[in-house]
Image (spheres, rainbow, N blue to C red):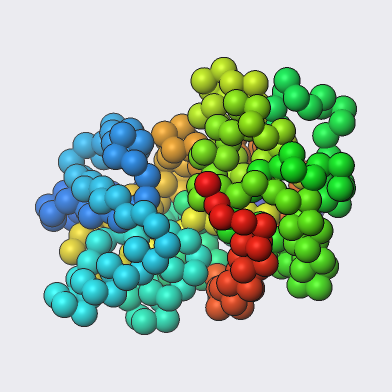
């Protein structure tokens, strides 16, 4: 049984910590308001990013955010490196995949941050340099006119059944199988990818046209992303999606660049994005939710499932595996 005096002391300590955080955040906000706009490098289209920025402005109207869209492969890492080498600074907040963020960390281009002081939920920050912002989650989508739900595979093993030959679509990158290797081992994932190639999936350069092809009935099943399946679903197409027994995913991380011009504003933005309010605003605008926050639709969609992803520090190993797996998948034919 807890002694009353100890309980009172614990409550006082908790209250003091909360007050300390509030005071610290107030000081960050005050300093951020006096500096230039926070430059945010991120991949969302401007119409989506504008909604996120507008939601942030309702809480922090005097901290300006300037969003710059960077898409495709190594764009974030390449631009950041070029700008740091040329002028000594780049975007204040950098949001991207674990591999690109880890590259920047290794070059010394990311600030070390005390995430606890920003009230970031434990587990969302795997290291002092980056914090979880959202995720691209792999799903199985199907055309409801062509496939009965009772006949659908619920496991990766069932998806690889020869009966689905010629009826499945896939992103041209085999990263789902590379991520699966994080939990089930490379040997098993390699054999599964070989079986996947054998059922001759139709390849797509992006998961958005892949989802559209499922919705139109061009293919029966598609291995794509949660967020790119939402648009045809919301438009009323006959398409649904589910998570299989193991859910591969790519966490999208954010960090603060070295010598950021509005370091305080960057901290406020990342604290907000890591909160329930900010995460829901980001998910509502982009479709990509933070799986670390149970309030998001993304987290609820994969609740109870086994998740599979390589940690950021293993990005080099994942990159090598992806390169080899992509070449295996490309033997199916050219992507559409």
Residue 227 visible to an observer of this rendering: no
Q: Nearer the viewer, residue 30 or 181?
A: 181
- Which residue occupies 86% across, 52% down? 157
Q: Residue furthest top?
A: 236
Q: In the displayed structure, does residue 303 sit left or right of residue 327?
A: right
Q: Can you tell which quarter of the image residue 198 is in?
A: bottom right
Residue 85 visible to an observer of this rendering: yes
Q: Nearer the viewer, residue 268 or 117?
A: 268
Residue 5 lies, in percent from the top left, at 63, 54
Q: Nearer the viewer, residue 83 or 153?
A: 153
- Which residue occupies 39% across, 66% down? 74
Residue 52 lies, in percent from the top left, at 35, 38
Q: In the displayed structure, does residue 74 sit left or right of residue 183?
A: left
- Which residue occupies 13% across, 55% down? 35
Q: Can you tell which quarter of the image residue 216 is in?
A: top right
Depicted 224 relative to depicted 141: above or below: below
Depicted 110 relative to depicted 169: above or below: below
Q: Nearer the viewer, residue 229 or 306?
A: 229
Residue 87 lies, in percent from the top left, at 14, 75
Q: Can you tell which quarter of the image residue 307 is in?
A: bottom right
Residue 115 lies, in percent from the top left, at 45, 62
């Amino acid at each position: 049984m807890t002694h009353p005096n100890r309980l009172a002391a614990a409550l006082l300590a908790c209250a003091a910590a909360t007050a300390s955080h509030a005071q610290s955040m107030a000081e960050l906000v005050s300093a951020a308001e006096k500096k230039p706009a926070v430059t945010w490098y991120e991949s969302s289209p401007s119409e989506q990013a504008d909604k996120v920025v507008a939601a942030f402005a309702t809480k922090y109207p005097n901290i300006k955010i300037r969003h710059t869209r960077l898409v495709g492969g190594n764009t974030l890492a390449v631009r950041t490196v070029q700008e740091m080498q040329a002028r000594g600074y780049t975007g204040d907040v950098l949001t991207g995949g674990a591999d690109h963020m880890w590259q920047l960390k290794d070059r010394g281009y990311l600030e070390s941050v005390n995430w606890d002081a920003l009230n970031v939920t434990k587990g969302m920050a795997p290291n002092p340099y980056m914090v979880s912002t959202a995720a691209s989650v792999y799903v199985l989508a199907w055309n409801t006119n062509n496939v009965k739900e009772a006949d659908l595979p619920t496991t990766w093993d069932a998806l690889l059944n020869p009966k689905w030959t010629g009826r499945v679509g896939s992103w041209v990158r085999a990263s789902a199988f590379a991520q699966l290797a994080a939990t089930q081992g490379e040997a098993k994932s390699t054999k599964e990818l070989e079986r996947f190639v054998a059922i001759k999936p139709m390849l797509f350069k992006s998961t958005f046209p892949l989802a559209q092809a499922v919705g139109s009935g061009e293919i029966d099943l598609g291995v794509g992303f949660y967020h790119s399946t939402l648009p045809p679903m919301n438009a009323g197409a006959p398409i649904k999606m589910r998570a299989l027994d193991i859910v591969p995913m790519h966490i999208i991380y954010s960090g603060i660049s070295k010598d950021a011009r509005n370091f305080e504003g960057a901290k406020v933005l990342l604290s907000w994005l890591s909160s329930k309010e900010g995460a829901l605003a980001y998910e509502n605008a982009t479709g990509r939710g933070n799986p670390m926050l149970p309030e998001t639709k993304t987290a609820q969609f994969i609740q109870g499932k086994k998740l599979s992803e390589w940690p950021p520090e293993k990005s080099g190993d994942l990159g090598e595996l992806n390169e080899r797996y992509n070449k295996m998948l490309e033997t199916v034919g050219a992507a559409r």
